[in-house]
Image (cartoon, rainbow, N blue to C red):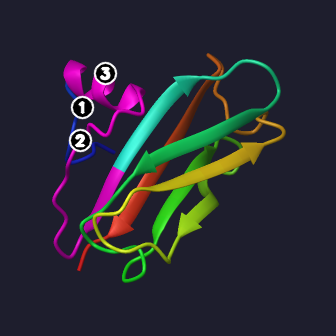
Amino acid sequence: MDLEISYAAQDYTDVADKNDVRVGQTATTEYAIHQFKDYATGSNITLEWEGQSNLAPSTATVYLQIYNRITSTWTEVDKDELTGADTDFVLTADIPDITNYKDGNSIISCRVYQLGT
């Protein structure tokens, strides 16, 4: 499935660091989704996403998920349903065993999403 927003090279650079540079997305009555893929080595990982939304997570929950390659489903690993609009928040998760989440090339897929109103 193709996402509505495809990251350009500069977008990848912008989201790679904690520098308050954002990649925006509009979502009216649809989901705003940012999906990330990365190499994962070893047996465990810690996921971290920092951002904000102009739609308060207290109004519409923001979710962090990782894709399970065995069950072909997204697994919720963190969420924010308390933060106000336009306020930084962090979603994190420790995944102690990534066996079910990486593909044959050791790539994991994660996403952050929120339903717009």
**Numbered circles on residues, count:** 3
Real-space CA distance between mark 1 and mark 2, rounded to the nearest whole angstrom: 8 Å
Mark 3 or mark 2: name the one nearer the start of the chain.
3
User: Few, some or many C-alpha atoms within 10 Å of disc 3 (few <14, some 14-19, many ≥20)?
Assistant: few
Task: Kindly identify the amino acid type of the residue bearing the numbered disc 2.
Answer: Val
Q: Secondary structure at mark 3?
A: helix
Q: Which residue is mark 2?
A: 23
- Magenta stretch in the rendered image: 9-33
Quick one: quadrant of the N terminus?
A: top left
- State left or right for residue 86 relative to residue 58: left
For the residues bearing labels 1 and 3, Cβ distance under 8 angstroms:
no
Cβ atoms at labels 1 and 2 below 8 Å apart? yes
Q: Distance between the Cα atoms at labels 1 and 3? A: 10 Å
- Compare residues 101 and 18 and report the one nearer the observer: 18
Report the residue marked by disc 1: 7
Identify residue for label 3: 13
Question: Which residue is found at the position 44% from the left and 53% from the top?
Answer: 112
Q: Where in the figure is residue 88, as x and y percent of width and height?
A: 39, 56
